[in-house]
Image (spheres, rainbow, N blue to C red):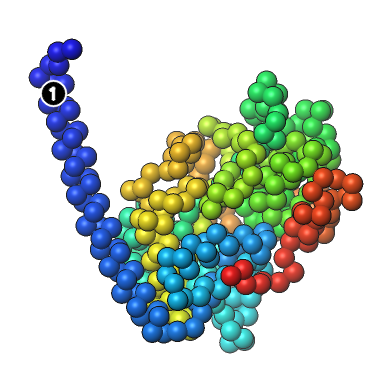
Amino acid sequence: MKLSLFHLTSMLTLALVHAATRMRARPCQHAEEEELGRLYDHALAEGGAIVLWAAGDTTAAMDWYCRAFQQRFPGLRLQVHVDRAHGHCAHIEHFLAGNGRGPDLILLQSAAGFERWKAQGALLEYRPLGAQRQKPGYADPEGAWITAWDSVLVPLFRSDVPAAEQPQSYAGFLIPSLHGRLVLTWPHDDDVVLYLLDRLQRAYGIDYLRRLAAMDPYFVHGTSVPAALLEHSTRFIGSLTGQAVDPGGAVPAARRWLPQRAPLAACNQRMAIFKAARHPFGARLALAWTASFGFQSSLATWRARSDVGEPPGLPPLDSLHGADVTGFNRWVADDDRVRALRSQMRALFGPHAGTSLQPGDEAAGRFERVAGHGLARPEPCC
């Protein structure tokens, strides 16, 4: 086949662009590795364990992160304490008031908390090389925080649901055959879920939430639990409040519906270091590693860097018109509205409680504690 001069010129131009991109990427990654090496040496000399407080539904939620860090940096011990975000925020306020010991660094979606702690002067300003590659708005300009990854809640359904019966709209989850077979996260116990239901109410009216309540859904604590229950218990078929994908790739293979224009809940998982960190070099190392090309490229979920692309099967978030990552930050800052919505959800769905699966249900023993009571207190996972 003959190629025109135009096509040959275009191919040569593309080849040069790709080569230039690779040449730019290699020095950048090399510089990041040198930065990590220096921090690693300082962290080893510093001794002790690095303490990270992270949001999650179970004590094992961050085991993948902990193992990856310690495999990458032998000789260091990363202690990750997992709790729901509002639990951590309460403990952090206690710690910043001069009571007890706090963490070296935090990983939460509580945007309002980060803004408040920055204003109080409690956060260490540190910008690793990887922070320069974060997507616009993902890293604080003064270095008070970075984004580790994005969390996204989407409708899920069992993987064995026939293609013809797979819901392709939010209304599709309200059909009579799904009555009593939906599993949802308590909205007044999780701000991201509350944000999602508020967006659904704005899009479809209060009647949608009333119809959802009339479906007699089964409520759990945490957003990682619905996907697990959909795969391991035949009692449940669908959910509106499940994580689209786990950062470490551990969420069971429940099928997801990614709305192109309908609302979904997306938020940044922010990471920051406290000025009072007892292991400042270890904390810098963990944050710089999280922002690095190598770590970001390994994530199974939506990534914070603009130069690594997304994992196979995940479209860019900005191509999903119903996703507004920065919208959660603005929404959660409106304390009066958030409090009013919690009261509204309690009126619609009842007060959240420690529910549990019935003894005869499949996987009851495995998920009863997670679905019912979540975490009683932060515990180290590594």
Q: Amino acid at mark 1?
A: Leu
Instruction: State the residue at coordinates (42%, 43%).
Output: 310
Determine the residue located farthest toward the top in the rendered image.
1
Label 1 belongs to which residue?
A: 8
Of 78 and 278, the residue lying toward us: 78
Above or below, 354 relative to 213: below
Instruction: State the residue at coordinates (68%, 44%).
Output: 227
Query: Looking at the rendering, in which quadrant would you find the C terminus?
Result: bottom right
Horizontal side of residue 200 vs 128, given as left or right: right
Q: Position of residue 41 (x, y in %)?
A: 34, 78
Horizontal side of residue 172 vs 107, given as left or right: right
Instruction: State the residue at coordinates (63%, 27%).
Output: 168
Above or below, 371 relative to 165: below
Query: Looking at the rendering, in which quadrant would you find the N terminus?
Result: top left
Q: Position of residue 288 (x, y in %)?
A: 38, 66
Asked if residue 338 shows in the view, the reply is no
Q: Secondary structure at mark 1?
A: helix
Decide: few, some or many residues near mark 1? Use Cα within 10 Å; few <14, some 14-19, many ≥20.
few
Horizontal side of residue 209 vs 49, given as left or right: right
Q: Quadrant of residue 365?
A: bottom right
Asked if residue 133 shows in the view, the reply is yes
Above or below, 135 relative to 128: above
Q: Position of residue 360 (x, y in %)?
A: 89, 46
Of 205 and 151, the residue lying toward us: 151
Q: Position of residue 234 (x, y in %)?
A: 79, 38
